[in-house]
Image (cartoon, rainbow, N blue to C red):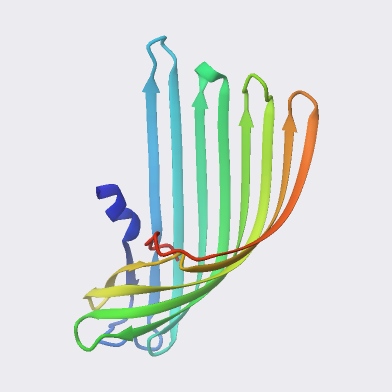
């Protein structure tokens, strides 16, 4: 339960006073950060390790009252090592984008409804090595997409907001992918794709 709660909540800061409205010129700072580091010792003396970190900051500015334009970027790194299976996994992901967010305060309750639209690009690379039947499996993907979602923000103080939203409500994405599999001969696969999706199941805070 604690993990789920942390996953759907984010903290955003407005450098200038909100005073029931997010005034023109206010600075928006937000984003997400998470990490996982673990090591498991086996009975035969070997050990498995798994490390991951995700950092996704966002910066914006109110160009009009309750209207934010901003930039966001992110990095995701995942590494795992399983000596018993002679397998290693390495994943790197990078993304950047722009967003616009419109707030609507709910009276003087301190709550705001918002809608965010964004456009961004992503670079993803995965490498798997060491399986008995696969010496190496490399995948590289470049993608771009549009997304939109609603959310709810609560003004804890004049400079601090707590937020949650349905990040996967609507998204359109295009990707180009290249994969090389060596076992031991090398086979190359190239894939292009387009997707549209909508979901109400994943309430998140990602920008």
Question: Considering only vertical position in the picture, is 33 above or below 53?
Answer: below
Residue name at image x 63 percent, y 45 percent:
125
Q: Residue 181 placed where, x, y %? A: 73, 33
Q: Residue 187 placed where, x, y %? A: 79, 34
Residue name at image x 52 percent, y 61 percent:
73
Q: Examine the image and state in which quarter residue 130 appears.
A: top right
Residue positioned most to the top: 44
Q: Quarter holding the C terminus? A: bottom left
Give the camera-side residue of 196 and 120.
196
Question: Considering only vertical position in the picture, is 102 above or below 134?
Answer: below
Residue positioned most to the left: 109
The answer to whether residue 111 is left or right of residue 114 is: left
Tally the numbered discs: 0
Question: Considering only vertical position in the picture, is 105 above or below 117?
Answer: below
The answer to whether residue 89 is left or right of residue 40 is: right
Residue name at image x 56 percent, y 33 percent:
89
Q: Residue 120 placed where, x, y %? A: 58, 66
Q: Residue 160 placed where, x, y %? A: 27, 72
Give the camera-side residue of 74 and 196.
196
Residue name at image x 43 percent, y 62 percent:
206
């Amino acid at each position: 339960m604690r993990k789920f709660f942390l996953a759907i909540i984010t903290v955003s800061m407005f450098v200038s006073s909100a005073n029931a409205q997010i005034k023109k010129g206010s600075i928006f700072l937000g984003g997400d950060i998470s990490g996982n580091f673990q090591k498991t010792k086996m009975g035969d003396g070997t050990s498995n390790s798994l490390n991951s970190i995700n950092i996704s900051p966002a910066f914006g500015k109110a160009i009009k009252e309750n209207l934010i334009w901003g930039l966001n970027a992110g990095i995701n790194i995942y590494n795992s090592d399983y000596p018993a299976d002679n397998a290693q996994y390495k994943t790197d992901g990078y993304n950047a984008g722009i967003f616009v967010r419109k707030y609507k305060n709910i009276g003087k309750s301190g709550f705001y409804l918002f809608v965010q639209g964004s456009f961004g690009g992503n670079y993803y690379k995965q490498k798997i090595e060491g399986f008995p039947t696969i010496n190496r499996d490399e995948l590289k993907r470049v993608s771009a997409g549009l997304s939109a979602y609603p959310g709810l923000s609560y003004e804890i103080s004049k400079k601090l907001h707590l937020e949650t939203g349905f990040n996967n409500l609507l998204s359109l994405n295009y990707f180009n992918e290249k994969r090389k599999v060596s076992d031991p001969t090398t086979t190359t696969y190239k894939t292009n794709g387009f997707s549209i999706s909508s979901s109400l199941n994943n309430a998140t805070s990602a920008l």
